[in-house]
Amino acid sequence: MIPADVIINLGEVPGLGSRKIRLLLNTFPEIESWPDLLTCDFTRVEGISDTLVARLRTADPDVGARMLEKLAAMHTRYVHYWHEEYPQQLKALYDAPVGLYLRGKETLAGDYLAVVGTRQPTSYGRDQTRRLSQELVAAGLGIVSGFARGIDTAAHKATLEAGGRTIAVLGCGVDVIYPMENRKLYQELLEKGLAVSEYSPGASPDAHHFPQRNRIISGLSLGTLVVEAGIGSGALITAYSALDQDREVFAVPGRVDSAKSAGCHEIIQKGAKLVRQVEDILSELTPPYAAQPGEQIDLLRRADLTDIERTILDFLGSEPTLVDQIAEELHRDISELLGVLLQLEMKGLVIQSAGKRFSRA
């Protein structure tokens, strides 16, 4: 495995981004030290200009070693692209970070959903964030967000309250608390969750870091849920990153005249799934999710079904069935049956196929 100090050294070279570092080290995978790297023929690597070669040759060779000592003292881990702990879903990104600094008790393993939104939410936005985050936790998912004011903070707090797994992807070093009013939340995150950053410890929360970190929020997740977001907000950058990464995108609708929900309405019009309840999300992800290991989430109990709805669901299977056949078998009027099936479809429990055929979701 390529030594971590070499990778950290490369990350400190100006102009040598993650993609070029990955290309460089994939070209020379047998590198064992910084001096070894400097003996390589850099002309074999596309995009490594003479300027970058000069910077490589004059770079401080001990930066990586000093950083690893600092990380050990502050109980922080460094997981690079070639490390076994590096998430496979992040490797799918064109501009995947070459390394991540991790601080806290959690790991990157497991299934997560991103929950993001405005920094100035309404009480409605905070309530929906808390409800959906805790229901997603009950379904076996962890929550990823950006530790910003507003919806991000509400998502992290709700997850920790529910005893769930949460990851905060920071736009600064993992040892920098931003915003400062989240000091208490930060300490709880270190004890029960995980702070993640591609920026070195001590890095300040510069404005350009935040749009960049959004690709990691979506990249760690099966999908992204936007609760409240205005047009052009950072939350929408995360949503569009998720689309670019071929991940699911969900949005909670708000009042039609609410500027804070205008971004949600925009992405719903463009194909994001409208979310009213947690099943709207779970039905789009690979089922089943477990509330506890080995225990399937009880969607029927959660949906609060009527007797006729439960009877229809008991009858339906995974193969689409004609509504006429359902009516005949259950001795029900077709018009009544179609109404009930529509309600079940809206709850995310039934799928309608062409020709009025229905199957269980």
Image (cartoon, helix red, strand yellow):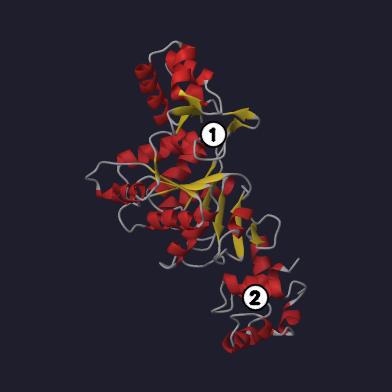
Query: Residue 221's x, y, as percent?
Result: 53, 49
Name the side, left or right, on which 109 lies relative to 252: right
Query: In this rendering, does residue 55 appear at all?
Result: yes
Query: Closer to the camera: disc 2 or disc 1?
Result: 1
Query: Residue 70's x, y, as percent?
Result: 64, 66
Which disc is residue 63 wearing?
A: 2
Label 1 packing within 10 angstroms: few (<14), some (14-19), many (20+): many
Q: Quadrant of residue 327?
A: top left
Is 101 above or below relative to 165? below
Q: Amino acid at mark 1?
A: Ala
Name the side, left or right, on which 85 lies relative to 271: right
Q: Quadrant of the N terminus?
A: bottom right
Which disc is residue 300 wearing?
A: none
Which residue was labeled with disc 1?
139
Q: CA distance from mark 2 to mark 1?
A: 43 Å
Query: In this rendering, does residue 65 appear at all?
Result: no
Residue at image point 38% right, 22% down: 338
Q: Return the disc, 2 or 1, that comes first in the chain's sequence.
A: 2
